Image: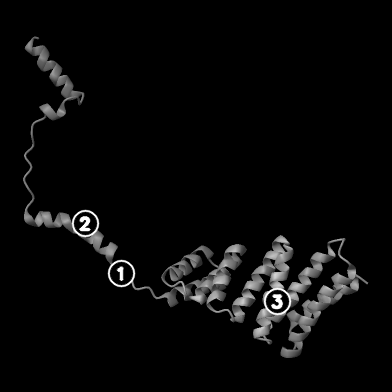
Amino acid sequence: MNWKVLVGSLLMGTVLGLVPAVYAPAEVVAAPTAQEAESLRQPHGRMFYLYNKRVNVNTEEHKVKARKLLIEGKDYPLALAELNLVLDLDKEDAEAFLLRGLVYTEMDKFSDADNDYREALRLEPKNPTFLYHRAYNFMLRYSAEGYGNEYDRAKAEFKEALKIEPYYIDAIVGLGDLYYMAGQKDKARSYVRRSAVKSEFQLAIDQYNKVLVLFGENDILKAKKEMAEQEIRDME
């Protein structure tokens, strides 16, 4: 082969990137100095330092943050993240289970909420507050989905809370609200006897009266009682 043709083809291969490694001039690279080598290793070392660093977590602070978000009705996913962190570190924190259950209830995730209330009750079986919130969660699910057994479960939990703490005002009112809700649902069902529907509304009135006797006048309770009484009058 003509040498000009050979050189031309090799140069064309270099231009096209076919043989750059063979014909590119070698570049001499000096070995890094000790100082340069150390500077190259520093970022790598810092990465592993941060990875291994122990973080001191104050679980009480995270519960306070979650409670504030819950009360203000803000950013429930962030509240969940706060409580997930707490429970990752301490799976025996009954209050954290309660708070996470409350967040799930607010998000209408009733099954997830009930799982957390059951965990809280596992740790403190006789805590009336846990029983009350579990009952309230059942009641909301009954209101939203109309499950018959949710009504019975809510009633049982409210009554269990009141067995432990007879003057638990929220549980008394909650039981009254449950009876009122059942009366409204039964009223819409043609197969339910009128006497049974009236009985539900009367049970609601009885609960509201207990609170009014124990704690005096309350405009909200008086309004609830009057609504239940009107429901009975409308059926006569």
Residue, disc 1: 54
Which labelled disc corresponds to residue 33? none
Mark 2 or mark 3: whose residue is earlier in sequence: 2
- Mark 1 vs 3, N-terminal side: 1
Mark 1–mark 3 distance (CA, rounded to whole Å): 45 Å
Residue 203 position, x and y percent, is 80, 78
Please give the name of the residue rendered at 8% of the width and 13% of the height, measured from the top-left corner: 4
Determine which residue is flagged by label 3.
174
**Viewer can see residue 72:** no
Q: CA distance from mark 2 to mark 3?
A: 59 Å
* Element class at badge 3: helix
Foreground pick, 140 / 46? 140
Occupied quadrant, residue 206: bottom right
Q: Is residue 47 above or below residue 152?
A: above
Q: Dot 2, crowdedness within 10 Å: few (<14), some or many (≥20)? A: few
Task: Please identify, in this view, whether the residue under mark 1 or under mark 2 is nearer the observer.
Answer: 1
Decide which of tag 1 and tag 2 comes sooner along the chain: 2
Q: Quarter of the image holding residue 6?
A: top left
Question: Which residue type carries mark 2?
Answer: His
Front residue of 154/208: it is 154
Write down the residue under mark 2.
44
